[in-house]
Amino acid sequence: MNTEVLALIFLLQICGQSLCQNATRPNIVMVMSDAFDGRLTFDPGSQVVKLPYINYLRELGATFLNAYTSSPICCPSRAAMWSGQFVHLTQSWNNYKCLDANATTWMDLLEANGYVTKSMGKLDYTSGSHSVSNRVEAWTRDVQFLLRQEGRPVSQLVGNMSTVRVMRKDWETTDKAAQWIRKRAASSQQPFALYLGLNLPHPYRTESLGPTAGGSTFLTSPYWLEKVSSELITVPKWLPMAAMHPVDYYSTFTKNCSSDFTEDEVKSIRAYYYAMCAEADAMLGQVISALRETGMLNNTIVIFTADHGELAMEHRQFYKMSMYEGSSHVPLLIMGPGLMSGLQVNQLVSLVDLYPTVLDIADISAVGILSGHSLLPLLSKASTFSKKQHPDWVLSEYHGCNVNASTYMLRSGRWKYIAYADGVSVPPQLFDITLDKEELHDVALKYPNVLAHLDKLLRSIVDYPKVSTTVHRYNKEAFSAWRQSLGGNYSQVIANLRWFVDWQKDPSANERAVDKWLYGSL
């Protein structure tokens, strides 16, 4: 951190210590899952799988019905949540480039103001992570060819009815989080803040595809599969490939979903995904149980959310990286002292709102300009909410792999507007979410005035053609620097990445295609 930020945090710490003396501030626990479809946290989606602890939060707290990711991919979305700023402001372009390691997060400010803090599990918001293959795919998304970047999505059953702990890494972290809660209850009167990041229900890496494979295996046990109401699993409708938006066509192909799938395959993938959500819910339950057993639940704000959703074969895709509801709609439930119970909030909100909300809960002033707005006025028993306090829109953006154009989504009222690249070279999309929940009917041409209004609003929030140009320049510069760092090994490395179709037939095809992208016609 720079000197000014350190000085400011020092002053905040002095103030925090004095505030802490009155012991009125609540503890704060945030559980962030990975790839959890927010529509499962309220009806009718909540009926397809048993999620008892999410239901517990829903009954005793507030459920946000329209909560969205700030970017439908792991690292950029988490960067927005931890920083309280839109992706284009932090320049978190992909899973490799996100926040600097010394960026000031809301957890830093809590610690500086007298909170005992602990972060456990999946953090994934700083630059430099994820595989070489993943980052090269993101950098070269402008290369003019189709790629198969992922393994074909599959489902896999393991164990038996007694196999509860399938995702062992998450369970081990959850155990440690529960132990930490019990330790805090016995040793300190200071308020604490705990962050627990889960990997579930993100699909597992497909081991048979080698060490660079992506996560395309939906894996669970009979124990969790029994929590799913199979009769309520729907088979999503798909547009014909020829009728797809060009970006959707690219994504479907690169996610290895362009071939045929049987109805049973699709149902199985969706059932296994829901079962993975049930296992994540049980981990949330273990945290809640630890708080209840130690007598601290009544003085703790509990927040459950996710970095993004999961398409689970909607729109002929799996994974995220899309602005469709399955990918962009996230869970957000908040429960705690002084907050209303059984509340369903229709207000459009996003992950950037969590930074000011957490600080508001702790009675801490934010540092700098934030993109988000505190949600506490929507929840508190003691405050009256005015719509002027929160905008009536949310922004999400995406600049990473599996999509061949920077993407910007604006939700406002009944509309979802999706703009691409410079706003001209790729056609925009417009959906009426109220009438078209499956998002199969693009009405951009039908409502040109709505389209123009929303595009004007989007441009007032972000100069998206300029941002797209910045991302394009970054991709080329980052790739060139990586290429140079490899020296004589470049040809071998680029030939062996998992992302080109039939590269074995022509190992130099990778290199030639990228050279053309970098330097023009050869």
Image (tube, rainbow, N blue to C red):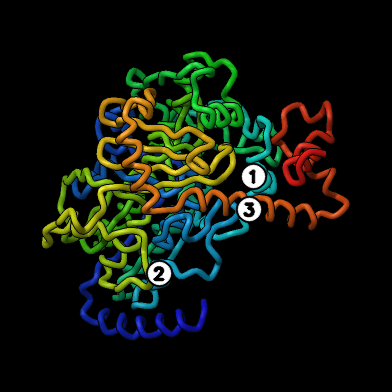
Classify 64 as above or below 358.
Answer: above
Q: Earlier in the sequence, mark 2 or mark 3?
A: 2
Packing grade of label 1 (10 A; few <14, some 14-19, many >=20) is: many
Confirm whether residue 284 shows in the render. Answer: no
Question: Which SS class for mark 1?
Answer: helix
Left or right? Give the position of 299 relative to 402.
left
Q: Which residue sits at x=37%, y=29%?
A: 444
Q: Amino acid at mark 3?
A: Arg
* Whole-number angstrom distance, CA of label 2 to CA of label 1: 32 Å
Quick check: 263 above or below 116? Answer: above
Which amino acid type is marked by label 1? Asn
Which numbered marker is on residue 117? 2
- Which type of secondary structure does the marked residue at label 3 adopt? helix
| Circle 2 Cα neighbour tier, 10 Å, few/some/many (<14 / 14–19 / ≥20) | some
Q: Three-letter amino acid code at disc 2?
A: Thr
Checking the image for residue 134, the label placed there is 1
